[in-house]
Image (spheres, rainbow, N blue to C red):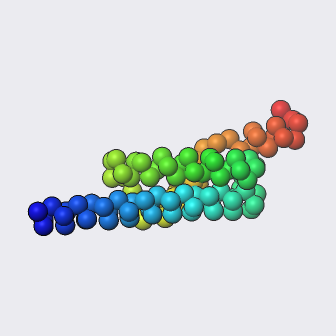
């Protein structure tokens, strides 16, 4: 009985660590999106850039959990996922659309 309680506590703590890693990754992705928008790297708008970056972070986080694919720490994965998603979305086409040119 004692070993089962220890094992249960261990898995519970691992789950808590994963929860903090996930939310921390989302925050880092939001910060990357905000900074890329304010520095002129993208032309989506702040809210749209944050949504796009969070999507990239979630995809990379799930790839890490399911397939053990990683670039290093959770923070580095979050930065890479957010930047990758922001690069893949055609930001220049959105900027042209806002200016009224085709």
Question: Where does the image place residue 8, in percent across and percent down from the top left?
Answer: 23, 61
Question: Where does the image place residue 67, in percent across and percent down from the top left?
Answer: 33, 47
The answer to whether any part of residue 12 appears in the image is yes
Residue at point 57% right, 51% down?
Answer: 54
Rendered position, 95 above or below 50? above
Residue at point 19% right, 67% down?
Answer: 6
Residue at point 38% right, 63% down?
Answer: 16
Specify the quadrant that holds the N terminus: bottom left
In the rendered image, the residue lying farthest to the right is: 100
Q: Is residue 3 left or right of residue 19?
A: left
Rendered position, 98 above or below 30? above
Give the image quarter of residue 96: top right
The answer to whether any part of residue 84 appears in the image is no
Give the image quarter of residue 3: bottom left
In the rendered image, the residue lying farthest to the front is: 1
Rendered position, 49 above or below 32? above
Question: Where does the image place residue 46, in percent across and percent down from the top left?
Answer: 73, 53
Specify the quadrant that holds the C terminus: top right
Give the image quarter of residue 97: top right
């Amino acid at each position: 009985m004692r070993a089962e309680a220890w094992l249960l506590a261990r898995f519970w703590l691992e789950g808590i660590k994963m929860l903090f890693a996930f939310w921390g990754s989302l925050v880092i992705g939001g910060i990357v999106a905000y900074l890329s928008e304010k520095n002129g790297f993208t032309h989506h708008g702040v809210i749209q850039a944050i949504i796009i970056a969070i999507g990239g972070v979630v995809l990379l986080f799930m790839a890490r959990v399911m397939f053990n694919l990683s670039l290093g720490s959770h923070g580095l994965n979050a930065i890479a996922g957010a930047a990758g998603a922001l690069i893949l979305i055609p930001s220049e086409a959105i900027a042209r659309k806002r200016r009224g040119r085709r």
